[in-house]
Image (tube, grey):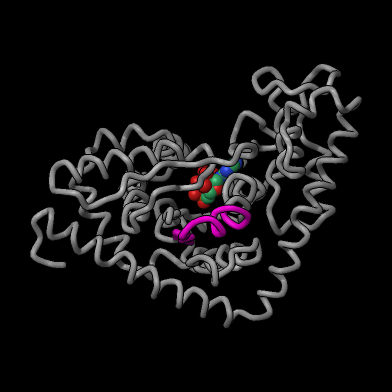
Amino acid sequence: MTRVFSGIKPTGHLTLGNYLGAVRQWARVDQHRTDALFCVVDMHALTVDHDPARVRRLSRQAATLLLASGLDPELCTVFVQSQVDEHARLSYVLECVATDGEARRMIQYKEKAARERDRGGSVRLSLLTYPVLMAADILAYGTDEVPVGDDQTQHVELARDLAVRFNQRYGQAFVVPRATHPKVGARVMNLQEPTSKMGKTDDVGPGIVYLLDEPDVVRKKIMRAVTDSGREVVYDRVARPGLANLLEILAACEGGNPEDLSGVYESYGALKKDTAEAVVELLRPVQQRHKELCADPAYVEEVLRLGAEKARGMARPRVDAAYRAIGLLAG
Ligand code: AQP
């Protein structure tokens, strides 16, 4: 059976981008057709300036939202990265296979390092090595497919390269994974800056729809979305990025294609109204289930405990074999 692994960072509150680009696909498709693991990758949240208590809070919230979005612990394994030591163990070994040039080429590293420097902060070494830890997350489980949004493609390619290189140098240890993306919604853009990704670390912002935003907040954000000059409601990602983003969000909510919505609307206002209502309806059951799960934190803790136990058992033999193959006595 196809092994699927994917993760989400507790660096901020989950957004509509996280949901349409990844989580919805995990719940609707991946957990049903594959042997799947989904992880709150909390160690990745330490790569930038952070408040420890907030990371712990956001980790619990992210896990609760994954379950609220429909991940079913009877069908898949849901767990937290730091509760499974094999991720860090394997990451070190992969750092001995990766090159510093490879890590420095990562687009997200360049962007996030620049952001840290602009804020007057220093860049943590873990920000540079983050894609190697992500490769360890993926390779530890013999993963075939990694369902992610567009922005993670380059990191999954690095995981592929490291798997191939390790296997060639030290003997067959890893499955070579590949990224998969949803047909629509793989890159949801910021509603106020439609040439930038809707990212959760931007924190508060009228351009970001959070999964837990109240319906009226969602409506307000979408009705105020930046659109482009021009009158016709047509789909053109390059020339009309704001409009294209709204058409993509609406199409993703309805399960259609943005191209098919070209020319359907006579005004921006009507498109925004329908998009807002579609998003409100999309989020309603997730928010409802989230509220129920928040009333039962012991259930969420138990799911994570059992998930970590299972994940540990799945990862350990492969990580031990990699340790032996690369020349270590441990493992
Ligand atoms: N805007 C997006 N559109 C589509 N997919 C997205 N994903 C993230 N943003 C969008 C996908 O969601 C999954 C989990 O994302 P993540 O937690 O690894 O990263 P992030 O949400 O992008 O958070 P960062 O990197 O901490 O913050 P920002 O973005 O603010 O720099 C992934 O599959 C991702 O592709």
Q: With 267 as the anchor, is 132 left or right in this view?
A: left
Nearest the eye: 202 or 176: 176
Instruction: Tell me residue 292's x, y (percent).
Output: 71, 75
User: Which quadrant does the C terminus fall into?
Assistant: bottom left
Quarter of the picture containing the N terminus is: bottom left
Q: Residue at x 70, y 32 (%)?
A: 245
**Does 58 sit above or below residue 16?**
below
Image label count: 0
**Magenta part of the protein: which range?**
26-41
- The percent position of residue 274, horizontal first and vertical second, equals 86, 40
Would you say residue 12 sits in the magenta stretch?
no
Residue for point 54% across, 70% down = 73
Q: Position of residue 41 (x, y in %)?
A: 44, 59
Q: Residue at x 60, y 68 (%)?
A: 64
Looking at this view, is 172 or 43 the one in front?
172
Q: Nearer the viewer, residue 264 or 63?
A: 264
Q: In the figure, 123 relative to 311: above or below?
A: above
Judge left or right: residue 172 versus residue 191.
left
Q: Nearer the viewer, residue 260 or 14?
A: 260
In the displayed image of the protein, which residue is found farthest to the front? 1
- In percent of the image, x 86 and y 27: which residue is there? 264
Query: Would residue 123 appear left or right of 292 to someone viewing this image?
Result: left
Q: Is residue 245 left or right of residue 199?
A: right
Q: Residue 259, how many percent across, how many down? A: 73, 26
